[in-house]
Amino acid sequence: MTDLAALAGRPVIAGAGLAGLATALLMDRPCVVLSPAPLAADTASALAQGGIAAAIGPDDTPALHAHDTLAAGAGLCDPAAVDAITRAGPDAIAALAGLGVVFDRRPDGMPDLHLEAAHSRPRIAHANGDGTGAEIMRALVARVHATPRIAVLDNATLRRVVVADGRVAGVRATRAGRAATIPTAACVIATGGVGALFPTTTSPPGGLGSGLACAARAGATLRDMEFVQFHPTALDSTGPHAGHAPRALVSEAVRGAGALLIDETGARFTDELAPRDVVARAIQAHLAAGHRVLLDARAATHGHFARHFPGIARACLAHGIDPDRDPIPVRPAAHYHMGGIETDLHGRTSVPGLWACGEAASTGLHGANRLASNSLLEAFVCGGFVARDLDATFLPVPSPLPAQDTAWPQAAHLTDVRTLVGRAAGILRDADGLRRAACALAPHVAHDDHALVGALLCLAALERRESRGGHYRTDHPGTAPAAVASRITLARAWPALAALAAPVARLSSGALMS
């Protein structure tokens, strides 16, 4: 067992995906990484298939990459963030290679670049075909293990960020079921997204938004919480009424290679390379009309699907599907959260001493609809931004932490939370459903982090009375002339949540689950 007293004063990085490990590796300070599972397990980064977007092709530029990103973001991107992160793309690929990542190359030795939807150039660097995330995490985990200044606490989960005198004073965590406390003046939240709060998702089980809840309880501002990206093509292996389990992703790169979306009659019904929100809504509507939806890659890969996409081929074959002979059944699934903890380009939040990066952060890169394969780019680049800022930041000597309750009631109604969030905040939303979900969740937000994140998401979606990017309101299908980011803090949300909670039976009664 690591001596926690010896770790006092070090920056604490909550999360061990790409963003968290990049932050740890790219800083010079000794630091602590809280990994909820064995290092790199249960991370969305390790599951990433398509690759990492960067303008490294001979006919590409960061300016073109930025243009495509801004177009996909439907008016809500921060142009300064887009410019900074896309300009850093080529150096990020070089840095990852220097850390030991082996990217795929063509026979002539040049990078093999995929094309994905809404990109104007092939710019997706990949590894092992569709195993990019796993290869990146393999290399970074090896580097972390070889770096003595990084202390990794496996099976440790951030529970609370302690704030004293207006700034971070420490973190409280659970490790293997026991409470742990680390006094520190710096905490980095890199805990990933919220996909596991939805019944149908490609996210790992740990993607429940816990870091967002900790940030909100510490007083941080959350931005654009309503924007959830639903990947159009998750493997439909278990039918629409399956219990909760992450679904295998059928990467956008398969459509980029020429695969076609068809129904059971063989007819095409949408543009395969349109932005993800457009394709996801088209598939959802086709399914709702009673059709099956299939991704036909037979002609695109010429009988060699597994050579191009070995991981997807294995997932398909495990369910009796041979992509060289059979179209692949697909359906949308919650995949990525564009919103999160608002940060600047240093990764700083509105709470002094608290940083965020990766999917947990809202940097302004993604806007209302993330451009494919920009997530790994943002995680690595912004992890570097945070690391450099931490190296340049004076960290005061931590004081003893104030006494606080170390019991965290959690997840008593996770199945109900998923049902409510999935019904109300899925691909199609309306005021009645969002209000009902927020009402049912409101009585539980004081003690249940999952209910808190679900309620804040529904509140933000209720307030955005328009359709834009990943947020589609059937009662407000038009897009407002001005694109305005949404911001919410727990202090500002409390009155609305209290008003909603007052007349509502407790969620455990099941009164709203019928």
Image (cartoon, rainbow, N blue to C red):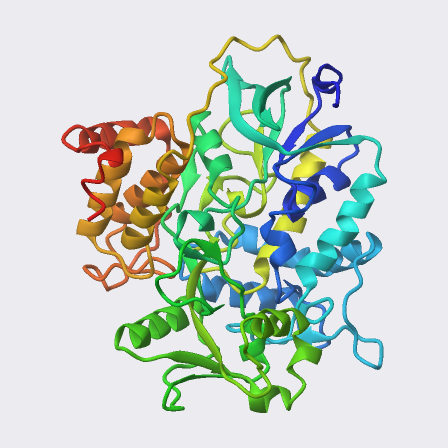
- Residue at image location 31% in from the left, 56% down from the top: 482
- Left or right: where 115 falls relative to 269: right
Q: Quadrant of residue 329?
A: bottom left
Which quadrant of the view contains residue 181?
Answer: top right
Q: Residue furthest left?
A: 503
Residue at position x 43%, y 26% from top? 217
226 or 500: which is nearer to us? 500
Q: Position of residue 302 (x, y in %)?
A: 64, 91
> Residue 325, position in %: x, y?
56, 88
User: Residue 47: x, y in percent?
Assistant: 61, 58
Image quarter in which the N terminus is found: top right
Label count reads: 0
424 w.r.t. 9: above or below: below
318 lies above or below 377: below
For the residue pair 163 and 263, the one nearer the viewer reads as 263
Question: Can residue 353 be seen at all in this image of the molecule?
Answer: no
Q: Does the image show residue 193? A: yes
Vertical arrangement, residue 439 with respect to residue 304, above or below = above
Where does the image place residue 59, in percent across and percent down from the top left? 68, 77
| Residue at the (35%, 55%) spot, across then down | 483
Q: Is residue 498 left or right of residue 333?
A: left
Q: With 68 as the anchor, is 473 left or right in this view? A: left
